[in-house]
């Protein structure tokens, strides 16, 4: 859906490049995670991909066509969910959606979306009376209002309670299963782990790691298993290499003691993030 080759970008007042020659592909029907610390360039990259910033160097194609040559029809095919909800506070939730729907040729029936997101009963309430979570849910519906082929989601579950975050993630998965493509940034690593087919980490304007979440965890983890056993109220920890799992020592331990937990020493995406970018996660870019 997108092919990015040697993308470079410098803000007018800056001497140094914010984006320093990054390349990546987003295949159709996949969810692509783009992660990086504050100021790494992920928001800039997203703004370039949705044509909010131009004057970049490098090649970007969308669905086989040069992004620079695409006209306003491009916006008919994409849905964008900014991190900060954008809405008119003096209009109701439904009026907001109707206003934005009128900007597009394709329009979707908003009633099922409002019901799914738990906003149907509040559709005639002014958005100024909405909670932050309600505004975030309305924002997500707005991104789907033109039946897009491609979704750009910036911190989509940030500020949502677990139940509504689950509904939103299920809707993202369904969008993909229906053939849609998603570009997502988030600092909530469990979301990225669950949703993404591929993840790219950006730091200081360059991509420092890129692969599926599963492969990244295999590459950066240790092939060891930790077994916790309890004997006479005493907890003991035992460490085995993967190739020791058929050994007499491991089998004897399993047979002779009460096992409380077994864990592989697979690393987390958060640990990988810190390792490859050298920075801890921040809530905002």
Image (spheres, rainbow, N blue to C red):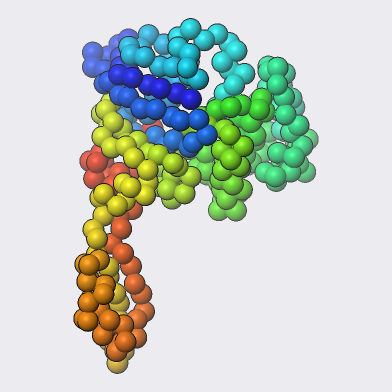
Q: Residue at x 58, y 10 (%)?
A: 72
Q: Report whether residue 8 is seen.
A: yes
Residue 35 is drawn in which quadrant? top left
Locate residue 62 relative to residue 34 in the image: left or right: right
| Residue 3 horizontal/vertical position (percent) | 41, 22
Judge by depth and name the residue closer to the eye, 199 or 280.
Answer: 199
> Is 279 situated above or below 99?
below
Q: Residue at x 23, y 45 (%)?
A: 275
> Is 190 situated above or below 7?
below
| Residue 40 horizontal/vertical position (percent) | 31, 30
Quarter of the image where the C terminus is located: top left
Q: Report whether residue 154 is seen.
A: no
> Is 260 situated above or below 122?
below
Count of numbered badges drawn on the protein: 0
Residue 192 is drawn in which quadrant? top left
| Residue 234 horizontal/vertical position (percent) | 27, 86
Residue 258 is drawn in which quadrant? bottom left
Locate residue 111 relative to residue 89 in the image: left or right: right
Q: Residue at x 55, y 53 (%)?
A: 162
Judge by depth and name the residue closer to the eye, 203 or 183.
Answer: 183
Q: Residue at x 35, y 35 (%)?
A: 200
């Amino acid at each position: 859906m997108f092919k990015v080759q040697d993308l470079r970008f410098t803000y007018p007042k800056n001497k140094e490049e914010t984006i320093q020659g990054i390349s990546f592909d987003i295949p159709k029907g996949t969810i692509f995670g783009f992660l990086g610390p504050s100021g790494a360039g992920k928001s800039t990259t997203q703004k370039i991909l949705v044509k909010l910033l131009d004057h970049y160097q490098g090649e970007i194609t969308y669905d086989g066509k040069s992004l620079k040559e695409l006209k306003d029809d491009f916006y008919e095919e994409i849905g964008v969910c900014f991190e900060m909800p954008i809405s008119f506070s003096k209009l109701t939730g439904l009026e907001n959606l109707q206003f934005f729907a009128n900007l597009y040729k394709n329009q979707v029936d908003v009633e099922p979306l409002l019901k799914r997101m738990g906003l149907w009963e509040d559709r005639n309430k002014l958005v100024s009376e909405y909670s932050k979570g309600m505004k975030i849910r309305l924002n997500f519906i707005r991104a789907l209002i033109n039946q897009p082929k491609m979704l750009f989601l910036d911190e989509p579950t940030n500020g949502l309670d677990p139940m509504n975050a689950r509904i939103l993630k299920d809707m993202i998965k369904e969008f993909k299963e229906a053939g849609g493509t998603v570009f997502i940034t988030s600092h909530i690593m469990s979301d990225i782990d669950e949703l993404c087919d591929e993840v790219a980490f950006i730091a200081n304007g360059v991509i420092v790691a890129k692969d599926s979440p599963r492969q990244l965890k295999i590459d950066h983890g240790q092939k060891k298993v930790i077994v916790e056993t309890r004997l006479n109220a005493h907890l003991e920890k035992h460490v085995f290499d993967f190739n020791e799992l058929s050994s007499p020592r491991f089998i004897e331990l399993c047979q002779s003691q009460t096992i409380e937990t077994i864990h592989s020493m697979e690393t987390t995406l958060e640990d990988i993030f810190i390792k490859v970018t050298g920075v801890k996660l921040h809530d905002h870019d």
